Image (cartoon, grey):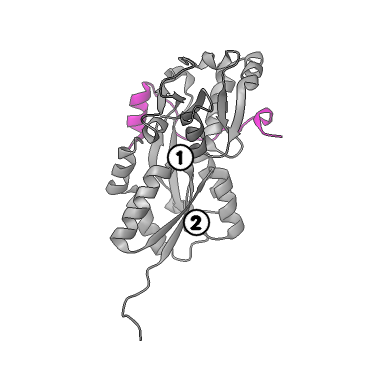
Amino acid sequence: MGTGLAAQPRLQVFAGAAAKPALEELARLYERRTGTGVALVLGGSGPVLTQMRLARSGDLYLPGSSDYMARARREGLVLPETERPVAWLVPTLTVPHDNPARVRTLRDLLRPGLRVLLANPETVCLGAYAVEIFEHAFTPDERAVLRRNLVNYTDSCERTAAVVAMKQADVTVGWHVFAHWYPDRLTTVRLPPEQVLRIGYLPVAVSRFTQNRAAAERFLDFVTGPEGRAVFARHGYFESPEAALQWLGAQRPVGGEYEVPRSWLMP
């Protein structure tokens, strides 16, 4: 005999780890509120997009920047009319809380022996932002010096922040929110506005593979609505491009794409 209760749908969200803390909270809150479970597949924005394409499953895609959403649109993997912005991010330098290497400026990354960490620019949106900053700020000879200081490429924003928090690197180009993820273990060193070529944002869209578009759009409405925005703000994300640019102190492009030079790609 049936219980008389309709089975609730379960949603699957492929997401860049740049959204992890806020998105995990929203998934829990949404399930308590509606009974609809939300399974998160988190990682680098590129690899999770590949997972979604190969599995031909998933209800929403939420990458760490507009770069990967543009790729998803070109490949026909999302429904473009459903795309919306969620929250905004500013690239900074991220160092351990006590900043033992005394990193103060971008040029400090050229000091001999400094341990510089880089999110993989081929698969993690943050890494592409970092390379764009390096290519603009440094000469070819200086970039060669910087490469000698690179200790590792990381596979997600989550891993990038964690490695610096564990003091396994002296500095990385991170998002401003990293210090909110580890308030007792990380510190933000702001870059001057002229070194920040663009700010980022987290977009979300319904996947072309969804089996329940209505349910997917309800969660999208929740994430991008007032309650969702408030959760992201509580985790340190900016609620508008204006707020992000005010914090930066200059007008800069919002989002966009950057093609990483092949010299930065892993062999």
Q: What numbered label is drawn on residue 18?
A: 1
Residue at left 38%, top 23%? 248
Front position in the image: 151 or 55: 151
Q: Is residue 112 left or right of residue 85?
A: right
Q: Can residue 120 be seen at all in this image of the molecule?
A: no
In x, y percent, where is residue 87?
Answer: 38, 40
Q: Quadrant of the C terminus?
A: top right
Compared with 12, 240 (above or below) is above
Residue 231 lies in the magenta stretch: no
Q: Identify which residue is drawn at 49% across, 55% down.
A: 79
Percent coordinates x, y for residue 154 in the rendering: 57, 35
Q: Which residues are magenta?
A: 239-267
- Residue 152 occupies which quadrant of the picture? top right
Image coordinates for residue 124, horizontal then vertical, percent: 55, 38
Name the quadrant of the N terminus. Answer: bottom left
Is residue 205 among the parts visible in the rendering? Answer: yes
**Cα gap from disc 2 to disc 1, whole angstroms:** 19 Å
Count neighbours of disc 2 (C-alpha within 10 A) and say few if under 14, some if 14 to 19, many if 20 or more.
many
Residue 52's mark? Answer: none
Helix, strand or loop for disc 1: helix
> What residue appears at the point 39 percent right and 30 percent down from the top-left corner?
179
Q: Give the dominant element type of the magenta stretch: helix, strand or loop.
A: loop
Three-letter code, disc 2: Ser
Front residue of 136/5: it is 5
- Picture residue at 39% right of the left edge, 43% below the top: 21
Confirm or deny contact between disc 2 and disc 1 (CB under 8 A). Answer: no
| Coordinates of residue 31 in the picture (x, y in percent) | 34, 59
Q: Amino acid at mark 1?
A: Ala
Which residue is under mark 2?
Answer: 207
N-terminal of the pair, mark 2 or mark 1, is 1
Tell whether position 247 is magenta. Answer: yes
Q: Secondary structure at mark 2?
A: loop
